Each structure stands twice: as structure tokens, then as C-alpha cells.
Image (cartoon, rainbow, N blue to C red):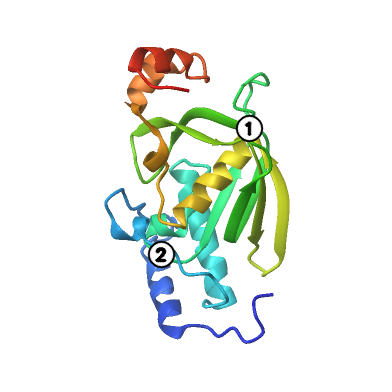
Amino acid sequence: MFGKNAKVDLELNRDVEQLIKTGGKEKLLPIVQAGEPVLRQRTVAYNGQLSKRTLAKLIDTMHTTMLEAPGVGLAATQIGLGLALAVVEDHVRDDEDDPREIAEFPFHVIINPSYKPTSDKTASFYEGCLSFDGYQAVRKRWLDITAEWDDEDGKHHSEPLHGWPARIFQHETDHLSGELYIDRAEIRSLTTNENLEDYWCEDPVPTEAAEELGFAL
């Protein structure tokens, strides 16, 4: 559980309830885009500022919004809320030989997350973001990490993550520190989703893109 002395912040709780209502019956919230100040602010650690009921509704609404987008992760900052929590979920694709090492990543609520690399191995792949809609760029990330977070019940977790799940966790955790993936991406790799599909999707390893667009892997 979150701290015994945790107190619900009544004003924040009301604001979050109002935010949830804007999603309507469909539970779909607008996703803020690059340039919004909230995306560049370090979030406040979550320690029980919301009632259990409001937190559960917020998580449900974020999950629905993420899936509808569609995406594999959504941080609270992406709906305009400066609390350190995110939701993640991804599933295995058909291609077992995909070099991105996409693996089953069941739905998780990650609160106050952090990570540390457990090796010096990295991987560079195209990556996108719901708050930088319509574009993708190559981003180098740690291949293996130890991920730590609290769940919605306040239980602490520490688990090793590898490959694509590790990338998702890093991406969402970085959001909560005010970072967008594009900040450390290979900027010459930046492409619209349409051009990615037309030119660079045949091989997930962006070797040809690096040669043609002029960036290093």
C-alpha cells in the first residue's frame, strides 16, 4: 500500500475526476502533442493523492485511450496530468524472427517507475510516440534493464526486461521525467509514418535507412 500517512489531495482528485469526464462514455481522452509544457515537466511522485475509486477510473480511461490510439504505452503527462504513472501493454506479433525481440508484455500500471541497464548492450530501431503523432525516428536504447515500479495497490515490483518490453518501459518512464524519445533519436532518421511504410519497413533493422538518410547505427 502507499504510505500509511498518505492523504487524498481533494483539489487534485476533483481535477482528475473532471478530466476523466471529458472522455465521455467512450473513455477516450485527447492526447497532448509535443510543445505542450506538461510533456516537459518532471512529474510528481504518486503517494496516494487520489482516492482508490478515482485512481481506478483514471487507469481504466488511460488504458482505453491507449488501446484506441492505438499504442503500447501511455504516460499521465500525455493526457495533461503531472503524476508519475503510466500504463503499458503489448502482445506478440506473427513474426517470430523479428529482430526487435517483441515479446508478450501484459497490461501493467507502472507508478513511480525507474530503470537501470544490466548490460552495455543497446539496440537501435524506429520508434514512435502518441505525443509526436505521425512520425518515427531511430532511437538507441538499452537492450536489458532492471525495471522497478509500484502497482495500483502500492505493491513494489522489480523485474528484468529484455528487448521490446524493455524499450516500452524506458519510453514511458522517460516521459515522466519530461523527456520525449525524439530528444535522443537520430534526427536524420526522422520520417513520416507514410514514408516509413514506403521505404524502411521491409527490414526492422534500419541499416538501409542509415545509409540512405545519413546517420550512424
Residue 81 is labelled as 2
Residue 89 is tagged as none
- The residue to which callout 1 is attached is 121
Which amino acid does the dot numbered 2 rest on? Leu
Q: 67 or 4: nearer the eye? A: 4
Q: Residue at x 42, y 65 (%)?
A: 82
Q: Which element carries disc 2, helix, strand or loop?
A: loop
Tell me: residue 89, above or below residue 156: above
What's the CA distance linking mark 2 and mark 1?
Answer: 33 Å
Quarter of the picture holding the N terminus: bottom right
Name the residue rendered at 52%, 73% in the picture.
54
Name which residue lies at 29% across and 59% down.
37
Among the two numbered marks 2 and 1 on one chain, the one whose residue lies closer to the N terminus: 2
Residue 24, horizontal then vertical, whole percent:
39, 61
Location of residue 31 in the rendering, given as x and y in whole percent from the top left corner: 36, 52
Q: Nearer the viewer, mark 2 or mark 1?
A: 1
Q: Residue furthest front?
A: 120
In-image side of 27 versus 33 (left or right): right
> In which image quadrant can residue 187 be found?
top left
